Amino acid sequence: MTVRLGMSVRLCVVGPYPPRSGRLAGYVADLVRALARRLDTVVCALDRHGLDYPDDVVAIIRESDRADYRRAGLVLAEYAVDAVLLQYDDDAVGDRGAAGLTEFVDELGRQGIPYLIGLHSLADPPAALAALARGAARTLVYGDEAREAALALRLVDRGRLSRLAADASPAVAAGRIAGLVRTIVRRDGRPAPATVELTLSGLDTGPASMEEYARQAVVSARLLGRPGLREKATLWAGTALHGLEPVNVAGDGWPLYGLGVLAGQPELPEALRRQARARRNALARTPADPYAGAFLVLGLVGSGPGRALVSAARRLGRAGRAEPWPGFGDRLEPASVRLPQALLAAGRSLEDEGMVARGLASLDWYAARVGLGAADAPLRLPSPVERAVDVGATVEAFVEAYRATGRAHHARWARRAFDWFAGANRDGVPVYDAGSAACRHVLGVAGEPTRVATLAYLSALLALADAGLAVLAPTDADGLGVAA
């Protein structure tokens, strides 16, 4: 399930805007009002005179300040904008403005925000306009004459050109634009996937705790579909299953998660799946602890929308507090992201939009408090000691949000959280070492590599790859250790 992308899509319209005068400024104001009935719409005003703008203007680009163009791209990322509509004509933008807008759209590309461009004049187009149109997901023109001019000037390929009637009112144009925006957000609303090497040689030792067995089960389940890894991943899953005996684990959520993932993994041999299902069912009484309940939900999702999932997810949903505290628990803790992650996964499986909305509200609120609300700030967990396992959970939670919504900002936040492992953290140092394929447990000089941290890194990486947010380089298949 993906949440219906209607009012949840946030569009920013960029162009001259009242109180600036001019024909295009008036048209943009009318278009914004019409779009606001269909999409969550904000404005970035192109300014020449240092004017005061209304509250729906979230960013201002002063034509005289070249740095404003790139800065505006960062501001729109912070406002969780999913797509941008540039409104262009020669009089309102001109050569200097068009050149500056190329830097603006470059920043949008870095943030994974697609844009459309509406062309209102092609009488004397500057050279920079070709670059703007070339990078646009869709170019809009008004009337047949404008369409033929755009094609003759080679501003845009025919397949990315949309024509509106020459006399189309803002209300009519808004209906067409809203449909295009929703389609483009679903198709293009994410950062370009990064290529990351998947190396498994850092897991040469066997699991030493119930959590490690469970994490190994989750990672092996995600590796089963990877080319050349099925046999080794199956052996690794069997090792994890052997360690996840349903004894002495009352109240522990990790065995519920690991066994549940194996039970719902169609790539696993049926005999192992049955064994995992039987062990999970022996433990699957809904635990009182909400964190263990979240792991139970995550373990049940892969088996489909059964009664056990419905019961566990509803109980988990009641664990949240009411506004104005949309988080779970009495304190802001790094591990709390597992609860909205579980609600999102359950909501997608059960097609329960209310459950998805509750998880999204909590995660979006959390993102603003851990540094992800700023476009160029590193992740900062609400803890004096930042642990790799908590960062991995954060990545997986925002991947789940992206799967639920398809919105660009959830993809960006998942990727930026993952960058913590590569050094985008408060210390500015890598936590994962590609040479040894091992991950340190905590950030700081005292951090030592541990197996559980390495498994958390791999789980986060595979979650990104499964969502199309990372591309895995050729796998070191021989490095997949299988411990007895």
Image (spheres, rainbow, N blue to C red):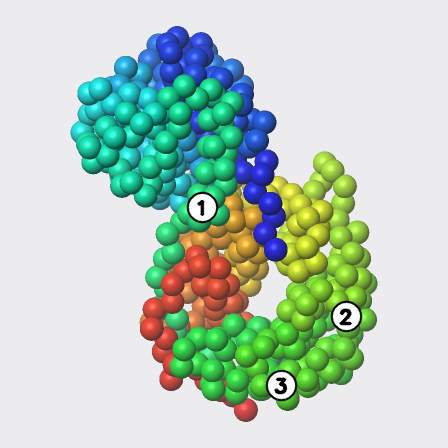
Residue 321 horizontal/vertical position (percent) = 76, 45
Q: Residue at x 81, y 71 (%)?
A: 285
Identify the residue position indicated by label 3 in the image: 270
Q: Amino acid at mark 3?
A: Glu
Residue 164 horizontal/vertical position (percent) = 40, 28
Residue 75 horizontal/vertical position (percent) = 44, 32
The residue mark sitting in front, 2 or 1, is 1
Give above or below for 327 relative to 39. below
**Element type where label 2 sits in the image:** loop
Q: Give the mark nearest the N terminus, 1 or 3.
A: 1
**Relative side of 308 to 465, left or right:** right
Q: Give the mark nearest the N terminus, 2 or 1.
A: 1
Q: Residue at x 44, y 81 (%)?
A: 229
Rounded to the nearest whole Å, what is the CA distance between mark 2 and mark 3? 28 Å
**Relative side of 178 to 37, left or right:** left
Quarter holding the N terminus? bottom right
Residue sitting nearer the eye, 253 or 276: 276
Q: Are there few (<14), some (14-19), or many (20+) residues within 10 Å of tag 2?
A: some
Quarter holding the C terminus? bottom right
Identify the residue position indicated by label 2 in the image: 251
Residue at the bottom extreme? 484
> Which label sits on residue 189?
1
